Image (cartoon, grey):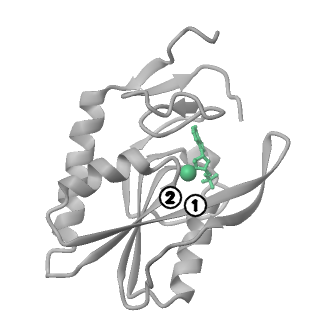
Amino acid sequence: MNDHSLPEVLFSEQQIRDRVAELANAISADYADGEEVLMIGVLRGAFIFLADLSRRLTVERQIDFIALSSYEDGAQHRGAVRLIMDLRSDVAGKHVLIVDDIADTGRTLEYLKRNLATRRAASVRTCVLLRKPSRHEVPVQIDYVGFEIPDAWVVGYGLDYTDRFRSLPYIGIVDSRVD
Ligand code: IMP
Ligand code: MG
């Protein structure tokens, strides 16, 4: 892909909008009994998904953010996850919904679920827009998944490739695997 070409469409704006609405309905139904949800967006990739999903929920919700990074050794994840920026909220006793852009190796979500459980959240559920099952290295249960995708690097709707393409309105595929 050269610098001027746009990534090939994997999911259009309309497909994303429809699926986000379905996810929001499912989540709203599951928390229906008056529980307040603390949505935790994983920066930076989840910011657009969280913005759209949160506006579609019909249950009471609060929003917070956390920033994490995988240690990397050249191009490969080495597996350890590092906390870059912590939450502002106290999660003790709260019903937490982790919202991330994509589950790749699964290590970010696995780390975050364990971390929040030690802070005595009342419950911890997970929601990702995308999931690459063939890349999972750790078993992690994900409660809400937008789309399962093959092993390829995807961009747009918050996801980047070296900080590019985050603001693309659709999800596109960068043809060669580049991470
Ligand atoms: P993990 O490997 O499941 O821990 O995912 C780590 C993070 O890598 C995700 O939250 C994304 O921010 C990023 N990531 C993984 N795969 C992709 C991709 O295809 N495009 C953009 N970002 C990705
Ligand atoms: Mg991420």
The mark tally for this picture is: 2
On the image, the x and y values in percent for residue 114 come to 58, 78
Determine the residue located farthest toward the right in the rendered image.
Answer: 73
- Residue 146 at least partly seen: no
Q: Quadrant of residue 124?
A: bottom left
Residue 59 showing in the rendered view: yes
How crowded is the residue under tag 1: few (<14 C-alpha within 10 Å), some, or many (20+)? Answer: some
Q: Which mark is residue 42?
A: 2
**Disc 2: residue Cβ within 8 A of ligand 2's nearest atom:** yes
Residue 177 figure quarter: top right
**Which comes sooner in the sequence, label 2 or label 1?**
2
Which x, y percent locates residue 89?
A: 43, 79
Residue at point 38%, 45% (across, down)? 48
Residue at (54, 35) in percent of width and height: 150
Image location (x, y in percent) of residue 35: 21, 81
User: In this view of the protein, which residue sits in the foreground, 42 or 23?
Assistant: 42
Amino acid of disc 1: Ala
Please report the residue visible at 56 percent of the width from the left and 35 percent of the height from the top. Answer: 160
Q: CA distance from mark 2 to mark 1?
A: 6 Å
What is the secondary structure assignment of the residue under circle 1?
Answer: strand
Q: Measuring 52% from the left and 31% from the top, which residue is drawn there? A: 155
- Pointer 2 with pointer 1, Cβ within 8 A: yes
Residue 67 circle label = 1
